Amino acid sequence: MNRWYVAQTHRRDEEKAAWHLRRQEFSVYLPRYLTRRRHARRVDWVKAPLFPRYLFIEMDSEYTQWRCINSTFGVSRLVCNGYRPAPVPDGIVEDIVARS
């Protein structure tokens, strides 16, 4: 059964981590929002991560080789409870997707 899990990324490497995880055929969700950035008298609208340093990965931890996530470029670690990945409670990620 597929569930959502959380991976912590390196600082400002959310997009790089998501790209490398997708290359490994993981389903990744990186929620973002538009924010205003000011630099050198210019104002730009950029997409920023809703949860800095975190992204969601959908997988079945029983049948997926999930340990390779920890050595993926951009990923710091998979959030675990003991030695097993800690699943996100049902409905949380779906609610975030529905609101975006």
Image (cartoon, grey):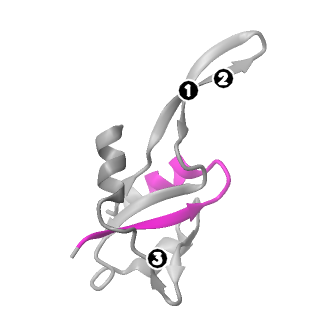
Neighbourhood count class around disc 3 (C-alpha, 10 Å): few under 14, some 14–19, many 20 upward: few
Closer to viewer: mark 3 or mark 1: 1
- The residue that mark 2 highlights is 37
Quadrant position of the C terminus in the picture: top left
* Contact, mark 1 vs mark 2 (Cβ under 8 Å): yes
Image point (34%, 39%), residue name? 99
10 to 61, vertically: above or below: above
Image point (74%, 19%), residue name? 39
**Magenta region includes residue 57:** no
- The percent coordinates of residue 9 (x first, y second) are 59, 60
* Contact, mark 3 vs mark 2 (Cβ under 8 Å): no
Neighbourhood count class around disc 1 (C-alpha, 10 Å): few under 14, some 14–19, many 20 upward: few
Neighbourhood count class around disc 2 (C-alpha, 10 Å): few under 14, some 14–19, many 20 upward: few
- Outermost right residue: 40
SS at badge 3: helix
- Outermost left residue: 1
10 to 65, vertically: above or below: above
Quadrant position of the N terminus in the picture: bottom left
- The residue that mark 1 highlights is 46
Marks 3/2: CA–CA distance: 35 Å
- Outermost top residue: 41
Residue numbers of the magenta segment: 2-20
- The percent coordinates of residue 79 (x first, y second) are 53, 73
| Kind of residue at disc 2 | Arg
7 to 17, vertically: above or below: below
- The residue that mark 3 highlights is 68
| Kind of residue at disc 1 | Val
